[in-house]
Amino acid sequence: MVGLSSRSAVAIHALTMLARSDDHSLTSAEIADSLASNPVLVRRILGNLRDAGLVWSTEGRGGGWSLARPAREITLHDAYTAVEAGPVLSRHAHPPSDACAVGRHMQDLLEAEFRDAEKAMEERLGRTTIAHLHRQVQDRERELAARDR
Amino acid sequence: MVGLSSRSAVAIHALTMLARSDDHSLTSAEIADSLASNPVLVRRILGNLRDAGLVWSTEGRGGGWSLARPAREITLHDAYTAVEAGPVLSRHAHPPSDACAVGRHMQDLLEAEFRDAEKAMEERLGRTTIAHLHRQVQDRERELAARDR
DNA sequence: CTAACTGTAACTACAACGGTGGCAGTATCT
DNA sequence: AGATACTGCCACCGTTGTAGTTACAGTTAG
């Protein structure tokens, strides 16, 4: 029931913020503010994104984070795989009994099924880019501005 | 990284065992043996499957568990939804800041994306039935028997 | 009435999570 | 030089969900 960590959500949120300000870098504190979280957590996750080549950071005063490539070339799947290590559907906690015909084969069979299912999910995540989310945010902001006029 | 619980794996494993012995019921102890687990855990999970109408149980001596409908009418998705409550991709831990344009909309946008992705996964799980897994187990057993001849 | 089951509650040990504080390293500004 | 503002990293905390276990009440068949 607990689901996976919320790291993907944080990563995608941060990437969208970086896409929004592509002319200047953002600090982990600024991103943490938007997330109502704290800078260390943000740096942990953005560190993963950097290892995956999605963003880069500069140290020292005036430092911060920027996208390493155009937002339209970063998918949600990229963010997901960068920060979320394990499988989504978890397998048997122990290997089942070898004395049972079902036990002998179920692990293999489930592995194949679960992998396919996860692949379907990841494939769907790969269809949306950060640029797409960024544009949606802009559209919604424009809509709000028009309503207030 | 931790992924979801292994309840789906247990549920599918148990359902396949029940499909295999559709003329007699199985006890939670027998199923637990095959899983190298323990009966209480099995009863917990099969209880969920019963609530979902996938299996039924009889109490008392000679009691046990049976499928409530044909194995070809039970998909992995049925098992999954019966035992796994929460979302697979987890959302923001907190609502983001309302003071940030990205924060204002990201939760909604992510919800839509993640829901689509989860749907893709569930749709794939819905394509495989317990009967299918059962047949695969039989095939593999036949293959093993042929090899030993 | 005893044996063999389900059903459920209570408990343990453990792992991962979000979150926090501290501090070394690094770059910029004055 | 020295202060300032960042990243990077480590160690720790409290909370939560997990698998697993014990215990026991309820139910049915022999």
Image (cartoon, coloured by chain):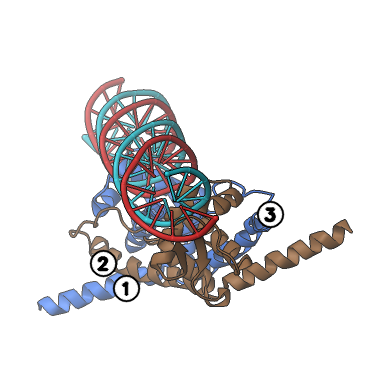
Chain colours: A blue, B brown, C cyan, D red
The answer for which chain carries disc 3 is: A
Q: Residue at x 71, y 66 (%)?
A: B138
Quarter of the image for the C terminus of chain B: give it: bottom right
Local crowd size for mark 1, using a 10 Å CA cut-off: few (<14), some (14–19), many (≥20): some
Q: Nearer the viewer, residue A142 or A9?
A: A9
Q: Foreground: B140 or D28?
A: D28
Disc 2 residue type (three-letter): His
Instruction: Residue A136: give its label.
Output: 1
| Label 2, label 3: how far apart the Cα atoms are | 48 Å
| Discs 1, 3: same chain | yes
Amino acid under label 1? Gln
Residue A59 on image: x %, y % = 39, 40
Q: Is residue A22 above or below residue B124?
A: above
Q: Mark 3 points at which residue?
A: A104
Chain assignment, label 1: A
The kind of secondary structure element at disc 3 is helix
Measured Cα–Cα span from mark 2 to mark 1: 9 Å
Q: Do the residues labelled 2 and 1 touch (CB within 8 Å)?
A: yes
Residue A74 location, x and y as percent?
47, 64
| Label total for image | 3
Side of B109 where B25 appears, left or right: right
At horizontal 38% and vertical 70% (from top left) the residue drawn is: B115
Name the residue beneath numbered marker 2.
B105
